[in-house]
Structure formats: C-alpha cells, structure tokens
Image (spheres, helix red, strand yellow):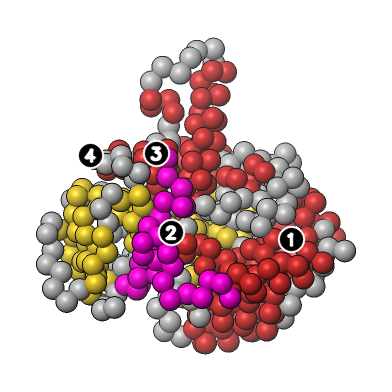
Amino acid sequence: MTDRIVVRGGFVLSMSSGPNDGRLDVLIEGGRISAIDTCIPSDGATVINAEGCIVMPGLIDAHRHLWYTALRAETMDHTISDLAKGLWPGVGGNITPDDIYSATRAGIVDALNMGITTVMDYCHAVNTDEHAERAIDAHLGLPGRALFAYGPSIAQKMKEFSGETPVTAWSHAVEVQKRLGECTRMSLALAVQGPFASGRSGFEHDLGTARDMGVPITAHIASVAGGPTDGEIRSLDEWGLLGPDMQFIHCTGSSDHEFARLRECGVQVAVSPMAELFLGMGVPPLTRMRRAGLTPAISADAVIGSSGDLFEEARAGLMAARGAAISEVISRGSPVSNKDQLEMTTMDAVASITSRAAAAVFMSDSIGTLEVGKKADLIAVSHRGFEPATAEEAASLLVGTCAASDVNAVVVDGVVVKEHGRLVDIDTQSIRDELAKTRRKMKSYFS
C-alpha cells in the first residue's frame, strides 16, 4: 500500500458546488486530495476500482453515543423518561472503563463499515478519568476520525432529574487535550449540560472553560417536545452566551424565534430523526430550522434506538421534513401542487450527512467535500447499476435507494480502511467477540 491512491472510474459527487462532479478519478497523495480529473495516471499508485459506484465525501455523524453500541436496539420501544429510570442509572452507573473501551471500539468499526469516516462521540458516561482515557484509547487504536465530546458522569447527569445543579470539574479534560496534542484524526470538545440543568453560573463556568481551552461545546437542548417553548436557547441568548463555537442537538422543544437567534449567532445544530421519533422526543425540527436559515446536520445519536446507518437517517429526516411541510399546505385547505412546497431536497439530505455535518463538527475547512487540498476522507457507494447522469441524480439515488451495505470502499486520512466491501487491517472478529461479552455484562447491569 502506497500513500498515493487513485480512485478510478466512479461518479464523483463532490458536494462542493464546483466542477468536481461527474465520471472522474480522484488522486490522493500524502493523505490529501491532490487532483480530481479524467484519466489520472496510476503509476506507482494503489488503485481503487470505483466502477459502478458514487464516490463521495465520507459520511459525518455529528452526534453519536458510541458507548451505547453494546446495547444496540435495546430501547426501540422506550422513551427518554424510560432511559432515565433504567439504562442511565443502571448501565451508565455501573459501566467500567473496559466496557467503554470495548463498546467504543465496536462502535467505531461499525461506523467505518457503514461509510462514516468522522464521528462526534458524545461520551456522557465519563464516571472517572479512566473511563475517558479508555474511550480515547479506542479511538486512537482505530483509523476513524473523531471529535471526542468529553462529557459528565452519569451521576452528574442524573442530577438533572432531581433538580440539583451540578458542577463539572474539567481538569482531566485539559489533560486529555494535552494528550491529543497534534493528533490529526482526533480533536476535543466539551459535552456540557444544558442551562436548565447547570444553571447560569454552571453553564458560564463550562463555556468559559471550553473557551479558555479553545475547544467547542455541544449540548442536548430542549430535547423533549411538549413543554413550554422559548426556554433554554432564550435563556442563553438573554445571558449573552450564544456563539459560533456551540453545537446544539435535537431542539425538538425549541421555538422558531429561538432558531432565528441561533442563526444570527452562528450556532451549529443537528437532529437525530430516528432517535427523536422512536424515543418520543418529538418531530425532528428540520423544516423549522431550515426556514430560520439554519443548515442542520443529521446524526444517528443512539444506536439503542436507531440503526446507525446515516443513509437511513437522511431518508428519515427528509421524510419528517417533507411531512411537516406537506401538512402545513394541506391544513390550509389545498393540495400540494409543486415541488417547491416539499421544501427539503435529496441534495439537502446528502449535505446534512456530509458538508453541513462537517460544519456541525467544526471541520468544514478540512472535510465534508471532495476538493483539492482537503483531507482524503471519501467513500465509494454502489449505485446498484443505476448510473447517475447528474449530481442531483446521484443524490436522489443515495437517499432513495442506498444503504450502509452498499459502501464498497472507505478511505480515511488517505488510508484505505475498506475495499471490495471488506474492512482492511482491522481484527473485526476479536472486536465482535469482545463486544458480545461486554453486551452480556452491560445488560446484566439492568437487573
């Protein structure tokens, strides 16, 4: 394997709004894209045959709890309130550092196999310093790209439900930042609790720490609809704290006015359609966010209540957004009569798991599109014999027909991670065996 790679013969969907779309080759050198053109010479290069595939940026999951991986599909018939009564105190309260390591490793491999090259790992079970260290060990030992969102302990999270105001000590997060140093594939964020849980002084402390460290923050905000609107975001706005170094997830209980303020302050947003619907959190507010001028990312969130397949999430998000838009038209007493009334397009859906997701994890300058000079994170996805003629057709095929199982090749940071439909140089069997043991342990914590 050389550091010079030619991805040959696929339909390139660059997501860059430039001339880089169509039947082209992609040249990778030194971990970066160095050319996108026709008939690139392959002398001395590793060649990835992308015939029959759409070549596109690696998928980016802007919000995913990798420590949940061992409990896949365990809460498909539960609500968030159920999690607060069972999974969080039972599993989260008893999870060991080695459990975190095993589940995180399995989650990374699962994501890579599905074409997800970058994950914001929102780790909110950092019960001890060692829990964080083992999660980071898992990331550093595998070839994925990550924004590690260092969160609180489960004990602290549970204080949200007792009305106590927790105080977070971030001293170990500072040490983690030093450990990561100049790591090219992993960076740090702080996963903070919302303002209603932490209070003004607590949130100001958390945000101030992140800004002193020079790292972004992410938070679950208004994650259950049905209560009063104009809440958490309004409070942060009144306190003068909103800024472009923030990413908020869910916001199902937020108002249109709050979304407008997020847009004005440059805050990034993400939604998780399948988790929000399956766990009863509310309707994904994609349409309302978009009308406010926001460009939301779509994420998988919790594989305890979703498949983790970002193609499915993009499809579910598009359906939820169109459902909201169509319902409004019909409620006015008229049928839907033109495509503009659908509002969200398939290209928007693909952007929500690529270019817009890159912005949501604060990496749009380096990943999320296929452009010369950007880091070489890309995937080749089978179009099942339906060769696209345009970028729009490619986007429609991806959202309308493709699934994680169609990902034939994955490249991260210029390294081939998957080829011919199989992961490369990853001991998947040992990871799978260890995951089975960890799953049994974690399920026993419920009893």
What is the C-alpha distance between the residues marked 4 and 3?
15 Å
What secondary structure is found at the residue carrying circle 4?
Answer: loop
* Residue 23 in picture, x, y percent from top left: 19, 50
Going from N to C along the chain, the mark reached first, 3 or 2, is 2
Which residue is nearer to you in this view: 6 or 159? Answer: 6
The N terminus lies in which quarter of the figure? bottom left
- Numbered tag placed on residue 389 in the rendering: 4
Q: Residues within 10 Å of mark 2 (few under 14, many from 20)?
A: many
What is the C-alpha distance between the residues marked 2 and 1?
35 Å
What is the C-alpha distance between the residues marked 3 and 2?
18 Å
What secondary structure is found at the residue carrying circle 1?
Answer: helix
Going from N to C along the chain, the mark reached first, 2 or 1, is 2
Residue bounds of the magenta highlight: 401-430
Going from N to C along the chain, the mark reached first, 3 or 1, is 1
* Amino acid type for the residue under numbered disc 4: Ala
Residue with the mark numbered 2: 115
Q: Is residue 407 magenta?
A: yes
- Numbered tag placed on residue 346 in the rendering: 3
What is the C-alpha distance between the residues marked 2 and 4?
23 Å
* Amino acid type for the residue under numbered disc 1: Ala
Going from N to C along the chain, the mark reached first, 4 or 3, is 3
- Identify which residue is drawn at 53% across, 63% down: 110
In this view, 436 is above or below 309: below
